[in-house]
Amino acid sequence: MRTHVKNWALLFLMSVFASLCRAQSEASAEHKPVAKPNFIIVLADDLGWGDLACMGHPIAKTPHLDRFAAEGMRFNQFYAGAPICSPSRAALITGRSAYRVGVYDLVGSNSAQGGRAFPVEERTLGEILKSAGYRTFLGGKWHLSPSAAGTMPAREHGFGGKDTFKAKAGQLVEELETWLHLTRGLSDEAPFFAFLSLREVHEPVVRWSTQEQRERYSLTDASRMSELPNGGMQERETARQGNPRSYLGAISAMDDAMGDLIRVLEKRGLRENTVVLFTSDNGPESSMPNSFGTAGPLRGAKGTVFEGGIRVPTFMQWPGKVKGGTISEEPLHFVDVLPTFCAAAGVQPEAGIQLDGENFLPLLTGESFRRQRPLYWNLWHARGGYQVAMRRGKWKILAGTGPIDDEKTVMEHIREAPFQDFALYDLEADPTESRELSAESPSEFASMKQALEALHREIVQAGPQVYLEDRRGKGRSLNEGK
């Protein structure tokens, strides 16, 4: 009997000890910080809204991107920051309108004043995440600093890596894998942010693909490329006179690289905790020999503020957080990326800086999201007659500014020119912008016009005044763009 009591007492003490250990272990687990997610942005160049098989392209072969879109969230109304490269990229990495930042045009001016440079004092997503303990990597096209200015992203804007302007998509993935290998051992717990900025499918497209990638498409397939919708922008003699297989091959090269990227993440055990965003900097080119890109049914192309110039194919994966097979119809914008990534990382953007974007993290996790600020675009030399656009809910308004007054500088024109030739569209009923409604919906038109003028005035007055090269008298019309 005494032995039984001793055994019982021993078992009781062991049970209590085990319970205490379990409770301590659970408490430690509860207080263990959740690993911050990694972030990768893959930014295509001049890829049209309809240039992928999953977006309705009848010829392009994009199995990796199709699978990526199917296994993640597809955004059917995601917008670039501007209809051309540099301003769009400025909006993406700052969360601010390009005109608020002061990037009014393509960066890389040949003028003595060196205008159109990305301001060094601007805080980028790379800088914000780096200050929060993230390792940062840039691979590919930067296009936000004139080469003569000496401001490269690795030194001035929070990005490690290098500006490899002429690298192919596959090479950028290889560079990222090498970088991950070299830096992983330095701090295994540190998260990373990688910006893979591709050259595909910008001209010269023949550089970006191999012969094998081009030969995936028959001559019959290639001949059908000229029949695809082009947004009504293919008007020059040089348009679509190149080799369609070069364009298709560049799309396949980009798609192959996307497949390689996912394999790298899986091999390194990084996929589950990595947010991967794929998008494009603007709509498809329409004025070059290999301009075979398409915005599908959308009106316009690169250089216009119509949907075809700014609505871009966009997909996101975040396994375990973003439900696969989800399609979002919420209008989103490049400026929304910074506040969303910061929220996901548990990082506060720098206080006192006016952001134009909004955190759409709730949308990713199935919660409600309601936008407070309208979406906005401006390009002083846009093609198509309109230079300014704003979207609020289902409504979109466009306006022109007319030719530059001979007595005005470009900067004065941007800040002071009155709007004219307004157009109003209901994108919910008419995504192709084929039915102008300002006369049919006068109260909505008046409200949108007032809101556009107020928002435009606020943004351009906040932006810095810089020298901008005047293109008058140089063989280029104001609306022709670049």
Image (cartoon, helix red, strand yellow):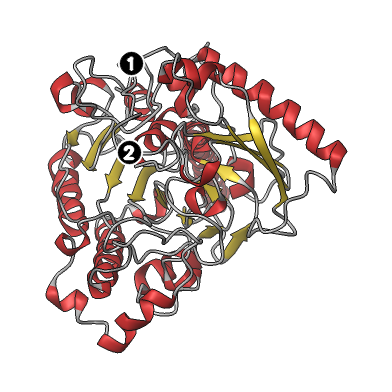
Going 56% across and 40% down the picture, which residue do you hit? 386
Where's residue 38, x and y in %?
37, 42
Q: Is residue 10 visible?
A: no
- Amino acid marked by disc 1: Tyr
Going from N to C along the chain, the mark reached first, 2 or 1, is 2
- Amino acid marked by disc 2: Phe
The residue that label 1 is drawn on is 467
Residue nearest the viewer, comparing 414 with 87: 414
The residue that label 2 is drawn on is 193
Near mark 1 (Cα within 10 A), the count class, few <14, some 14-19 or many ≥20, is some
- Looking at the rendered image, the disc whose residue lies closer to the viewer, 2 or 1, is 1
Residue 285's tag is none
Going 27% across and 82% down the picture, which residue do you hit? 217
Residue 56 to residue 91: above or below? below
Going 40% across and 56% down the picture, which residue do you hit? 284
Near mark 2 (Cα within 10 A), the count class, few <14, some 14-19 or many ≥20, is many
Where's residue 230, x and y in %?
46, 65
Instruction: Specify whether 451 is left or right of 307.
Output: right
Where's residue 62, x and y in %?
36, 72
Instruction: Specify whether 56 is left or right of 202.
Output: right
Where's residue 332, x and y in %?
58, 44
Residue nearest the viewer, comparing 425 with 190: 425
Q: Is residue 39 visible?
A: yes
Going 85% across and 40% down the picture, which residue do you hit? 442
**Labels 2 & 1 near each other (Cβ < 8 A):** no
